[in-house]
Amino acid sequence: MSEDNSPLVIGFLCNWCSYAGADMAGTSRQAYPPNIRIMRVPCSGRVDPLLIVKCFEEGADAVLVAGCHPGDCHYTEGNYHGRRRFALLRDLLDFMGIEKERFRIEWISASEGKRFAKVVSEFTDEMTKLGPRKVG
Amino acid sequence: MGEDFTQQIRDKAKELLENGAVECVIGYETGSDGVSARPAFIYDAAEVDRLAFDNTCTHNLVKYLLDKKGKSTAVVVKGCDSRALNLLLSERQIQRDKVYVIGVVCPGVVEWGWNKRSEQLQKRCNWCRQHTPVVSDFAVGEPITEEPPAEFADVAEMATKTAEDRATFWRDQAERCIRCYACRQACPGCYCIDCFVELLDPEWVGIRIAPDENWMWNTIRAYHLGGRCISCNECERVCPVNIPLSLLNRKLEQEVLDLFDYKAGMSEDAPAPLITFKKDENLGIAE
Ligand code: SF4
Ligand code: SF4
Ligand code: SF4
Ligand code: FES
C-alpha cells in the first residue's frame, strides 16, 4: 500500500506474450494505472510460488501473473504447469486470509495491448475497493 | 494388538536379519521412560526382542529410509505411514526392491508424553481412512474396511471466518513459530538437500525469527507438500509450540481432491498433480 492509499500491485509478465502486450499498450498510448510494478519473466511457468508469497510477505496488496494463452506458451507447457500451481496457491493464500481476488492470473497475448490496459485498470479498481491488506 | 503384533514383528525381523534379506530393521522400541515408543534400528538378529508395537508408536519411520538409500532395509509402517512409501517411490527416492515393508493394520495411536500415556486417540486417527497399509510385504493384523472419505470440518470452520480474522489467526500462529524446523525434519516429504528456508542466495526467508519471515516459512512449507502430504500429521505432533499445521495441510489436501481428484501416496505410479497437467482444464483461472 502506497502513501496515497492506492494499492500496490506486482505484475509478473511473461516475455513472449504479456510483456509484449504491455509494450503494445504503451506504444498505442493505452492508459493504465501506475500502481502496477512490472517484472519481466521468461514464462509464466517461471513464476515460482515463492515469488508470489514473497510479494505478499513484503506487503504487496495484489499480484498479477500474466502469460501466453493456453496452447501459445513459447515453451509449450509452462503456462499449463503454472495454472495448476497458481490455482492451488490461490486457495491456500485465501485460507490464510489473503483473499482470492488479490491474486489474479490472466492470459494476455502480444497483440492484446488494449486488453492488458483493461485488465490492469479493472484489477486496480477492484483492489482499491477491497482496500489495503489489514493484516500482514 | 500389543503382545501379538509385537511378537509377529520380532519373528519377521529375526527371519529377515538371519537370512540376510535386510541389513537393518527399522521399527519401534519402548523408550527410556518405560512407557512411550521411540524408533529402533536393529542390525542384529539377537536384538529383535527390543522391538515392540503399541498405541504409542507414532513416528513415521519411512522418513529414515531416506538415510538408507541403496541398502536393504525393513521398515515397520502403520496405515498412514505406508502412503509415504508410495510418495517416495514415485519421487524415485527409494527403491522398492531394497525395502521390505512390515505393514501393521493400525487401530490408532494415542496422545502421550514423557512417562505418560492417555487413552485419547491422536487427531490424525480421527480423520484416518487408511488403517490398513497401502503397501506391505508382510501384514500384521487383519485388513479392515475403511470408512467413507474424510470430511474436512476443521477446514470448513476456518473458512467461515472473515479474511481479516483468518489473516490474524495465521499471523498469530507465525508469531509463535520458533523456526526449529522440527516439522520439516519429521516429514517424509521434506527431503530437499537445500531447503528454500536455508538458502542464502536468493534469501527467500530472512534468518531473523520474526512474524513475516515465519509466515513465509509456514506458508511455503505447507505449499511444498501440496498434493504430496500423506496426512501422517507428524509435522504437527512434533511442533513444540503446537501450531495447527494440519489445518494448512488439510486445506491443501481438500483442494487437491477437488481440483485434481488426487490423493497422495495411494499408488506408486500416479503422477503428483503439480508435475503434470491437462490442457483443457481451467481450474477457475482466467475464465
Ligand atoms: S515445528 Fe512448529 S515451531 Fe518448529 S518450525 Fe515448524 S511450525 Fe515452527
Ligand atoms: S519445506 Fe520445501 S524446500 Fe524445505 S525441505 Fe520441505 S519441500 Fe524441501
Ligand atoms: S506435511 Fe505433515 S502430515 Fe503431511 S506428510 Fe509431512 S509430516 Fe506428514
Ligand atoms: S512463454 Fe508465455 S507463458 Fe510460457
Image (tube, rainbow, N blue to C red):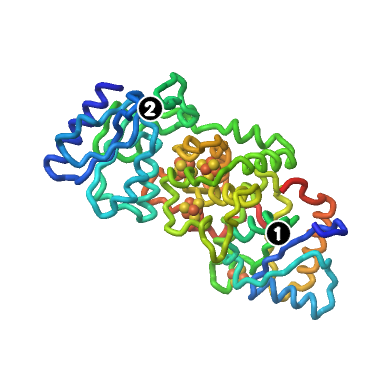
Q: Return the x and y of residue B112 as percentages of the image width and height.
A: 43, 25
* Mark 2 Cα-neighbour bin, 10 Å: few <14, some 14–19, many ≥20: many
Image-quadrant location for residue B4: top left
Q: Secondary structure at mark 2?
A: loop
Q: Quadrant of the C terminus of chain B?
A: bottom right
- Camera-side residue of A42 and A105: A42
What amino acid is labelled 2 in the image?
Thr
Q: Which label sits on residue B56?
A: 2
Residue B257 in view: no
Q: Which label sits on residue B7?
A: none
- Camera-side residue of B55 and A99: B55
Mark 2 and mark 1, same subunit? Answer: no
Depth check, mark 2 against mark 1: the one in front is 2
The relative height of residue B69 versus residue B31 in the rendered view (above or below) is below
Identify the residue under disc 1: A63
The relative height of residue B56 versus residue B228 in the rendered view (above or below) is above
Q: Would residue B71 appear left or right of A5 to someone viewing this image?
A: left
* Mark 1 Cα-neighbour bin, 10 Å: few <14, some 14–19, many ≥20: many
Residue shown at 47%/27% (left/top)?
B122
What amino acid is labelled 1 in the image?
Val
Q: Spatial distance from mark 2 to mark 1, Cα to Cα? A: 45 Å
Q: Secondary structure at mark 1?
A: strand
Farthest right residue in view:
A4
Q: Return the x and y of residue A101 as percentages of the image width and height.
A: 73, 51
Q: Quadrant of ligand 4?
A: bottom right
Q: Return the x and y of residue A18 as percentages of the image width and height.
A: 69, 71
Q: Return the x and y of residue A108 as percentages of the image width and height.
A: 70, 68
Q: Quadrant of the N terminus of chain B?
A: top left
Query: Do tag 2 and tag 1 residues touch (Cβ < 8 Å)?
Result: no
Q: Would residue A36 appear left or right of B203 to someone viewing this image?
A: right
Residue A126 in view: yes
Farthest bottom residue in view:
A27
